Image: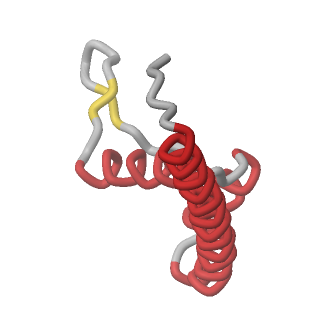
């Protein structure tokens, strides 16, 4: 997914600001659970230039919907945990149960 990285006379890679920005974006996609195969597809489209902007946008919109759904699920799970904690606190107060584990 990294193409055209130049090297110095010793063979070490020289990363430009664009290269670093691209790597950071790839890391973001991975953190958002985009499969490597889709990242590769996105990268291939990117290397084809502006004619693929529409396809890349669609891929990102799909990822966006997936992430929003994950956030919604996490918020629901957090609410259930908070409800359970409140329930336990009420039981502790009712029973004078203030044991610490």
Residue 44 shows in the view? no
Q: Does residue 31 appear left or right of residue 59 in this picture?
A: left
Give the camera-side residue of 86 and 16: 86
Q: Residue furthest front?
A: 95
Q: Is residue 12 positioned above or below 28 on the image?
A: above
| Residue 73 image point, x, y percent | 67, 64
Q: Residue at x 64, y 59 (%)?
A: 80
Q: Is residue 7 positioned above or below 93 on the image?
A: above
| Residue 24 image point, x, y percent | 38, 48
Display colour scheme = secondary structure
Residue 66 picture quarter: bottom right
Residue 79 picture quarter: bottom right
Give the camera-side residue of 55 and 61: 61
Q: Is residue 79 positioned above or below 57 on the image?
A: above
| Residue 91 image point, x, y percent | 58, 46
| Residue 38 image point, x, y percent | 72, 56
Residue 76 shows in the view? yes
Q: Is residue 59 positioned above or below 97 on the image?
A: below
Q: Residue at x 44, y 44 (%)?
A: 4
Give the camera-side residue of 11 and 97: 97
Query: Which quarter shows the N terminus?
Result: top right
Q: Residue furthest top?
A: 10
Q: Residue at x 34, y 17 (%)?
A: 11
Q: Residue at x 55, y 48 (%)?
A: 85
**Numbered-mark total:** 0
């Amino acid at each position: 997914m990294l193409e055209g990285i130049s090297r110095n006379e010793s063979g070490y890679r020289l990363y430009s600001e664009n290269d670093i920005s691209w790597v950071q974006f790839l890391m973001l996609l991975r953190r958002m659970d985009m499969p490597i195969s889709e990242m590769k597809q996105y990268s291939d489209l990117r290397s084809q230039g502006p004619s693929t902007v529409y396809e890349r946008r669609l891929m990102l919109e799909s990822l966006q919907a997936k992430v929003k759904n994950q956030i919604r699920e996490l918020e629901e799970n957090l609410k259930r945990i908070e409800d359970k904690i409140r329930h336990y606190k009420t039981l502790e107060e009712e029973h004078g149960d203030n044991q610490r584990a």
